[in-house]
Amino acid sequence: MGMSISESGLDADDFAETHEINVTPFIDVILVLLIIFMVAAPLSTVDLPIDLPTSAAAAQKKPDKPTYVSMRPDQSVAIGETSIGRGDLIRSLDAADPNRDRVIFVRADRMVHYGELMELLEELRSGGYARVKLVAVEAAGQSRPATGR
C-alpha cells in the first residue's frame, strides 16, 4: 500500500514526527502503586484492639520489622496478632526470631494492672530479652511534659 503525498494534497509536514512524551502510562503506573500502598499500609501494623495510654515523650523511629508483644485487659498475651499462652511467650519469640538482641515492643491496655505488666516484663527479662520498649499513644497537642506550674 503506497501513498503519494503530492497527489493527495497533503504536505510532508503533516506526517512529521511529534517529539512529545506520552505520560498516560506513567500516570497509570503511579495510580496503581498508590492503590497498592493504600491497601498494604494498614496490613503492616498490629491491629489488636488495645486502649493504649498516652505519653508526651517524643516519638522514636520504628524498626523495619518490629516485634510487638501485646497484653489485653484480660491479661491474655499476643505476639503481633497471634494469641499465645502466657507460658509460651519466650518459646514463641524464639521460634519467630532467635535473635535476643532485638527490641521487643510491649503494648499493654490501660486497664492492665501494673503488677501484671511487671510480671510480663520480668518474664521477658528472664528469657533473655533485655531490650524492651513500652508503646503508648502520643498525647495530642503536647510536645513535652507539663511542669505543674
Image (cartoon, grey):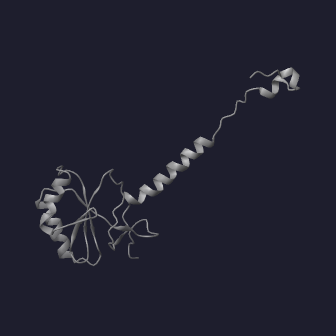
Image quadrant holding the N terminus, namely top right
Q: Residue at x 15, y 70 (%)?
A: 119
Q: Residue at x 29, y 73 (%)?
A: 109
Residue 73: quadrant of the picture? bottom left
- Which is nearer the eye, 44 or 122? 44
Q: Residue at x 24, y 76 (%)?
A: 112
* Residue 124 seen in this snapshot: no
* Residue 39 seen in this snapshot: yes
Q: Viewed as shown, does residue 62 lie left or right of 123? A: right
Q: Position of residue 113 (x, y in %)?
A: 22, 78
Say how many tags the image has. Answer: 0
Image quadrant holding the C terminus, namely bottom left
Asked if 8 appears above or below 144 in the picture, the reply is above
Asked if 28 appears above or below 84 in the picture, the reply is above
Asked if 109 appears above or below 4 in the picture, the reply is below
Question: Extreme front residue here?
Answer: 1
Q: Position of residue 85 (x, y in %)?
A: 16, 68
- Which is nearer the eye, 75 or 115? 75
- Which is nearer the eye, 145 or 54? 54
Q: Residue at x 50, y 54 (%)?
A: 35
Residue 131: quadrant of the picture? bottom left
Q: Viewed as shown, does residue 12 lie left or right of 101? A: right
- Which is nearer the eye, 52 or 29? 29
